[in-house]
Amino acid sequence: MTRLTDFTSYADAQRHYSKEGLWELFDGTRERFNIAHECIDRHVDGDSVALRVAHADGADEVITFEEISRRSAQVAHFLTEQGIGTGDRVAVMIEPSLAFYCAMFGVIKSGAVAVPMFSLFGPDGIRLRVDDCAPKVFFTNAQKAPDAIEGGAQNVTIVDSDFLASLDDLPATFDWSTTGRDLAVLQYTSGTTRLLPAAVKHSHQSIVTLMVAALYGTGIRPGDRFFCPSSPAWGHGLWHGTLAPLAMGVSTGTFSGKFDPVRLLRALQDFRITNLTAAATHYRMMRNSGEAENYTYSFDKLSFTGEPIDTETAAYVERVFGTKVRSMYGTTEIGVIIANYPGAADLEVRDGAMGKAVPGVEVQIQRADGTLADPGETGELMVLKRGEWFPTKDLGRVDADGYFYHGGRADDVIISAGWTIGAVEVEDAVLSHPAVAECAVIGAPDAVRGLVVKAYIILKGEETPGLVEDIQNHVRARLARHEYPRQIEFVTELPKTPAGKVNRKILRDREAGKLAAAQ
């Protein structure tokens, strides 16, 4: 039987895609469906590798489908013995490891709801989420257990090799009984650690829809050696980097511990990774490490998400890694809606473009009044859901051939002396300067112009005389003359969300605070 995974071209994606075709990739039905079965249990075959984990300390951890299947069943029995039932929340705050995957899939297998939490959260971040979702059990490691207790977590349970060994007498299989509509994962989006972001509810059958992103956003196919360095506490790391490849029986990999781009480069070489999906920040860090050219690679597909990638980094990645890095766009709430179809030889990858709409999804650029924008006109990205247009809160434009381009968050637009300026475009121009390593652009309050463009810049080296003017002239030469950063501040770090995106809101608030203090 021909399946959607048998097709790789853009033309075939449009011709053969169907919702029924997505369901044919799975064993389950809407009446009986479980993510742990679909991702793990049905792929047990001898010593077949499920995961390769690159630990920051240099260790490599290889985990088989069989080991996760057996130990996650024992975790599920443990939870049942603790009185944890269908729909009960269970938090999982563990770095990627055998312990994490056994705990996560054990929760899902049992019928409880897994709540992944970022391992760098302190007591305040933990308390916000614990107060919101009230987990009955809190799985973590010995290092984070005190923070979990201080954050108000109940039934804090340390999951390590000793804990897993203590479950050896429990059955190695578990008779799950969930339906496709039952809740499987409650995932918080990556806002700040001190403000509670939205909690997105994912049912077991959410993974069926996820396969649109897997097929056309990351281009996963059987036989790939996949890798995603994003934390599985977030949507990209869990759904795109973990669940999607495992659902196809594809071995995947990830990073555990404090991120180090050189350690990642070595893992990509040693694991012979053929398909990498990462955040734009990861690619910039690999480039800025100065070490990427010292390793050999096996890539045939690369993708990124989270935020736009600057043109200099995109060109560097193509030269060093041997293939273009392709964008996919979406959010935790709406999923992936635009992609560049990695592996599709018949789709041109246009510089700066996010790609085209994925099959089965209708996307438009609309003006503020809700009318359809013309090709090339900037407006808000909207997606059709259940018969209504849903705002993404991102700006964009579409060309005459249906390629979409990102215009930044709607609240990142800078109105200066009546001119509309996009922070993303200015950042891209600043990042192309040879002295610049990282950059964030915002609108800073100004008595005359309302706002002026301000760039916060991390340099590759030391500041030199005349560098500010040189960067400004560099941007003037690439953009309209009014779009250059009138203010430049050199910094040693930029505020970022837990998922690694630059948090421009903190920078805007900082500038607003300076203005208030001066009045």
Image: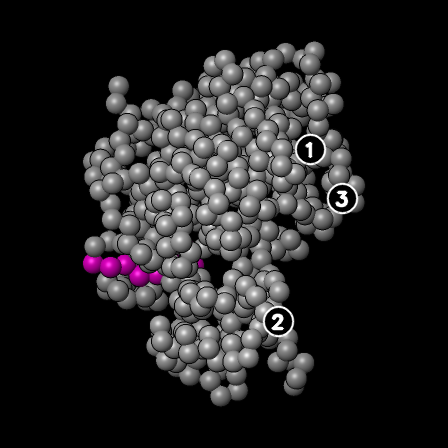
User: What amino acid type is highlighted by mark number 3?
Assistant: Asp
| Nearest to N terminus: mark 1 or mark 3 | 1
The alpha-carbon separation of the residues under discs 2 and 1 comes to 36 Å
Q: Residue furthest bottom?
A: 448
Q: Quadrant of residue 514?
A: bottom right
Q: Would residue 439 appear left or right of 88 to someone viewing this image?
A: left
Residues tagged 2 and 3 counted as in contact (Cβ below 8 A): no
The answer to whether mark 1 and mark 3 are in CB contact below 8 A is no
Tags 2 and 1 touching, CB below 8 Å: no
Q: Is residue 197 visible?
A: no
Note whether 229 is above or below 417 in the view shown.
above
The residue labelled by disc 1 is 139
Q: Which residue is mark 3?
A: 147
Q: Residues within 10 Å of mark 3 (few under 14, many from 20)?
A: some
**Most foreground residue, 110 or 485:** 485
- Going by the numbered disc 1, the residue's amino acid type is Phe
The secondary structure that most of the magenta stretch takes on is strand
**Residues shaded magenta:** 392-400
Q: Tag 2: residue type?
A: Arg
Q: Secondary structure at mark 3?
A: helix
